[in-house]
Every structure is written in C-alpha cells, then in structure tokens.
C-alpha cells in the first residue's frame, strides 16, 4: 500500500510509521524537520510544510491512502491545511484518509446535542485544540472522501496493551485514557481493514 503519513515526527505518528515500515508498505512522509524522524530507511521524505499547497499537492500525488497524525500544536495548522489537503486528494483521486483527532469532538453522553468539549463531560479549561479538530471533522464531513477520525481521550506515552474499547461517535463509557501505542495500533489496523468509514471513533481502556 502507498501511504502518505503526516505528523510522522509526533508521538502517535512516529509509532504509526514504525508499524507501516515493518509491514513494508511504500511510505511517504511530509515533515518540516527530517532530522527528527526516528526511521528514515525505506521512507520517501518530502521536506516541507503542510501549509504550502504546492508541497502538499506533491506529497498526495501517487498514494493510495493518507494518515494524518498532525497535532494542533497551539496553532491553526489543522484548520488551514485540511481544505488544501481535501483539494489535493480530490485532484489526485485519493479517497481514503484516517486522522487522529481528540475525544472532545465526539458526542457528549451527558448532553447528546453537544460535542464533549462543549459539555460538562469535558474537564478541559481550554477548547482551542478541540475547535481545531472540530474544523477537520466538519471539513471532512462535507467532502466526498472516505474518512475516519480516531478520537483518543487522555493520551499518556506507553506501549500498546492490545486491549481497549472503541465506540463510534462517542467515547466508551467511563473511558479515561489510552496509550500512544494503542492509539497508533488502532489507527494502523483501521487503515488495513477499511472500517469505520465516515465515522469518528472514540478509543479508551
């Protein structure tokens, strides 16, 4: 499979990269700082920024699927880059994208008409990151793409345990956390199985 991975130097992205390289997929990464990549062998590296539309277009060309583990990083990178990414995917007829979001954009169990970050279910004091991820959800929902947004709750570092719960559009009941390793594993398995099309997926222990 020919995969474009965005966010490959981040916590979840670097674990996804390891899994994909181990299975000998054709991996292309678009990164600002190639020196931060943990794996460079058998990886096509494009140095650049996802906010540069020409570079992003080049990266999308020739792949089968896109995995985005971009973080908000206290910026508007997600909300600015997503429309450009969708345009590039439509141009090059790439239909499948899996992104890593946040549990804040899932439906609230307590107040179903609200997103979790808008409800009393969320304990976060700032909503900036959730609003950025919400912009991705809204943009993908309005597209014709086959998208999945994996939405972990509190995300400590840690290896995969291999046992966790998932729930489409809502966080598993009483879900508290999920390790980086299990989040990456679930994203990768979703990529291989093509499940959860046009869905947000909550993931937690």
Image (cartoon, rainbow, N blue to C red):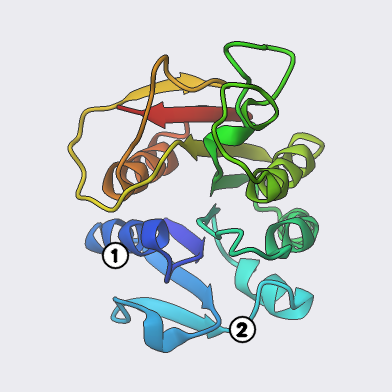
Residue 186 as seen in the image, left or right of residue 3: left
Q: Could you say where residue 172 lies in the image, as x and y percent from the top left?
A: 42, 18
Residue 21 circle label: 1
Q: Would you say residue 66 is visible in this rendering? A: yes
Q: Could you say where residue 29 lies in the image, as x and y percent from the top left?
A: 49, 72
In the rendered image, which quarter contains the N terminus? Answer: bottom left
Residue 177 as seen in the image, left or right of residue 104: left
- Identified at 75% across, 54% down, the residue is 86
The kind of secondary structure element at disc 1 is helix
In this view of the protein, which residue sits in the foreground, 143 or 186?
A: 186
- The quarter of the displayed image where residue 54 is located: bottom right
- The quarter of the displayed image where residue 204 is located: top left
In the rendered image, which quarter contains the C terminus? Answer: top left
Residue 79 as seen in the image, left or right of residue 2: right
10 Å crowding of disc 1: few (<14), some (14-19), many (20+): some
Residue 48 circle label: 2
In whole angstroms, how far apart are the C-alphas of marks 1 and 2? 21 Å
- Identified at 21% across, 28% down, the residue is 163
Q: Is residue 7 above or below residue 109?
A: below
Q: Could you say where residue 156 lies in the image, as x and y percent from the top left?
A: 32, 48
């Amino acid at each position: 499979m020919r995969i474009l991975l965005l966010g490959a130097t981040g916590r979840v992205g670097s674990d996804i990269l390891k899994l994909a390289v181990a299975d000998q997929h054709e991996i292309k990464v678009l990164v600002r700082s190639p020196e931060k990549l943990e794996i460079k062998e058998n990886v096509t590296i494009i140095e650049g920024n996802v906010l540069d539309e020409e570079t992003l277009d080049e990266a999308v060309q020739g792949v089968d699927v896109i995995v985005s583990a971009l973080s908000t990083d206290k910026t508007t990178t997600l909300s600015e880059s997503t429309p450009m990414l969708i345009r590039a995917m439509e141009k090059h007829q790439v239909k499948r994208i899996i992104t890593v979001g946040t549990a804040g954009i899932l439906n609230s169990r307590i107040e179903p008409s609200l997103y979790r970050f808008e409800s009393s279910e969320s304990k976060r004091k700032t909503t900036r990151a959730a609003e950025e991820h919400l912009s991705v959800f809204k943009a993908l929902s309005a597209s014709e793409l086959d998208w999945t947004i994996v939405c972990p709750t509190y995300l400590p570092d840690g290896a995969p345990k291999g046992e966790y719960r998932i729930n489409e559009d809502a966080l598993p009941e009483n879900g508290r956390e999920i390790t980086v390793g299990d989040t990456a594993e679930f994203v990768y398995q979703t990529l291989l199985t093509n499940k959860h099309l046009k869905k947000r997926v909550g993931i937690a222990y």
